[in-house]
Image (cartoon, rainbow, N blue to C red):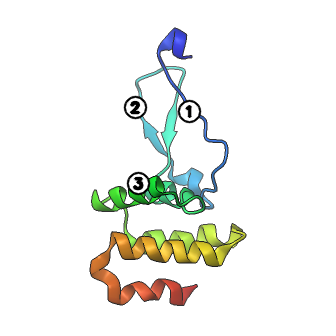
Amino acid sequence: MHRQHSVYLDAVTVATPPDEYESRLKPLFPDIWNNLSLYALEAHDLALTKIARNLERDRDDVQRLAQAGFLDRETLCSRYLNELRPYLVRETSHDRTLQLWVESCWPESQDSAGAVTEDL
């Protein structure tokens, strides 16, 4: 596709999105192409696909999404608990990762951040 149409696609072969993510996909460039539709993950779902890998660039991405106002703490935690955690193998490790993300993205909510792990 890139030779003929100058379109570059990078396939993601391994990712664990939250349950029901398909219902929240966001269309990219709607009504631009007749025979092609592109969709992106909603910000909370995108962030949660990064929880298992949790590399530095993943943490940076999540912090940028939060700083830009695309992530809500309660929505992120709720989707993790209800739509992703039931399908994870090492959930306690991911629980700690989510807790660290909450603490780094919303430092002003340090007092209430413990509620995330209490719910787990």
From the image, state whether disc 2 or disc 1 is nearer to you. Answer: 1
Dot 3, how many residues are within 10 Å of its Cα: few (below 14), some (14-19), or many (20+)?
some
Dot 2, how many residues are within 10 Å of its Cα: few (below 14), some (14-19), or many (20+)?
few
Distance (Cα) linking label 1 and label 3? 18 Å
Q: Residue at x 70, y 67 (%)?
A: 87
Give how far across and how far down residue 100 sits, in percent.
45, 74
Secondary structure category for the residue under label 2? loop
Q: Residue at x 36, y 61 (%)?
A: 63
Quarter occupied by residue 88: bottom right
Tags 2 and 3 in contact by the CB under 8 Å rule?
A: no
Q: Residue at x 56, y 16 (%)?
A: 1
Judged left or right of residue 47, residue 29 is left
Distance (Cα) linking label 2 and label 3? 22 Å
Secondary structure category for the residue under label 1? loop
Looking at the image, the residue that sits furthest to the right is: 89
Q: What amino acid type should be assigned to the residue bearing mark 1? A: Asp
Q: Residue at x 40, y 24 (%)?
A: 32
Judged left or right of residue 72, residue 44 is right
Give how far across and how far down residue 45 sits, in percent.
51, 57
Q: What amino acid type should be assigned to the residue bearing mark 2? A: Phe
73 vs 99, nearest the viewer: 99
Instruction: Give the residue number, with chain letter if any, for mark 3.
Output: 61
Quarter occupied by residue 105: bottom left
Secondary structure category for the residue under label 3? helix
Query: Which quarter shows the C terminus?
Result: bottom right
Instruction: Give the residue number, with chain letter if any, for mark 1.
Output: 10
Q: What amino acid type should be assigned to the residue bearing mark 3? A: Asp
From the image, state whether disc 2 or disc 3 is nearer to you. Answer: 3
Give how far across and how far down residue 101 sits, in percent.
43, 70
Image vertical order of residue 101 relative to residue 59, above or below: below
> Any mark on residue 29, and which?
2
Tags 1 and 3 in contact by the CB under 8 Å rule?
A: no
